[in-house]
Image: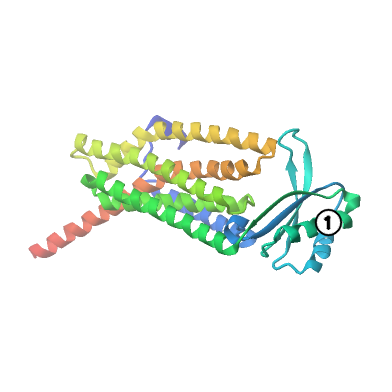
Amino acid sequence: MIKKLFKGEFAYMQNLRFFYYFTAVVFAICIICNIIFGTSLDIAFKGGTLVRYSFEGDLTEKAVSDYVSQFKYKSLDVQISEAVSPGSGEKYQLINIYTTNVLDTKKVTKLNEAMEKQFKDYKVKQDSTSSIQATIGKLFFIKCLVTVALATIFLLIYVGFRFRRIGGWPAAVMAIFALIHDLFIAYFSFIIFGISLNDNFVAVILTILGYSINGTIVVYDRVRSNRRLMPKASLNEVADVALNQTFTRNFNTFLTTFIAIGTVAIVALLSGLESITSFAVPMMIGTVAGFYSSTFLCIPTWVLWMNKRAEKAKAKEKAKKK
């Protein structure tokens, strides 16, 4: 299979069922992971206060949680994680205390003093504090969804108009189908890698929208050209030729992008740059999904749809003649 792909001899339409099964299995695994691990929203979306403390020793989450519970914060969540200092590269431990309460400066100061006094043997010190109103977080989340929806609508209109000579709207709908596939895979990557959905999630989604649609447009453009050059060929044959002609180009684009983002992800992981890691890692998965959907799912499914439309049109013509 791999040799035929790079030789330009692969029969995409004949193997479409295999890719449907493969996609179904991947989605089933991702859904199971989502059920097991759940969806974690960042403070930017759900609101509240997140206070982080650095410490030394073997302090446990239970010990911190039992102590902080006296403050009677709503939806209290205490986690211990590891971070890397951007300057020295040294690893250190963090206590992450999250609550849906929005704590003002006085309350944060009171918590800091209590933590440093209670766990002075562990050299507890405040590392960072972030706080946001729940209504602001929800509003930001809604605005992000609207942005993604508008971008999708504009892409739908653009593809439908540009490729109107090869059945524009079906082509546009299949392009959006591929994008939805990619967006779900990007979402699942956040879940599987334990990354909270934050503003980077929106950045990843919008970047993948542009990246994925680019590969799809390249193939559609080749299909449009081949239909003029191969007037007697079936749509299946035209699509297979177009996909084989564009495979190397799209694969090289994907590989270059993947290596570049992978390099950023590795550097970010080694440097402890969590904000960059939460963008780069899902983006790597997104590029894989974008290449896969535009090559193996979008165009073959569009051909399947167009063939069924042609069959229905023929059936109607026969019915009229009778």
Q: Quadrant of residue 248?
A: top left
Q: Residue at x 36, y 40 (%)?
A: 11
Residue 252 vs residue 49: left or right? Answer: left
Residue 184 visible in this rendered orientation of the protein = yes
> Where residue 145 sits in the image (x, y, percent)?
46, 57
* Viewer-proximal residue among 307 and 168: 168
> Where residue 39 sits in the image (x, y, percent)?
60, 59
The answer to whether residue 108 is above or below residue 92 is below
Q: Quadrant of the C terminus?
A: bottom left
Q: Residue at x 35, y 48 (%)?
A: 155
Residue 238 vs residue 127: left or right? Answer: left
The answer to whether residue 226 is above or below residue 185 is above
Residue 132 vs residue 72: left or right? Answer: left
Q: Residue at x 42, y 43 (%)?
A: 210
Disc 1 element: helix
Residue 4 visible in this rendered orientation of the protein = no
Q: Residue at x 88, y 50 (%)?
A: 122
* Viewer-proximal residue among 258 and 135: 135
Q: Quadrant of residue 266?
A: top right
> Where residue 136 sits in the image (x, y, percent)?
55, 60
- Looking at the rendered structure, the kind of residue marked 1 is Glu
Badge 1 crowding class, 10 Å Cα cut-off, few under 14, some 14 to 19, many 20 or more, is some
The residue most toward the left is 321
Please give the residue where the numbered disc 1 appears in the rendered image. 113
Q: Quadrant of the N terminus?
A: top left
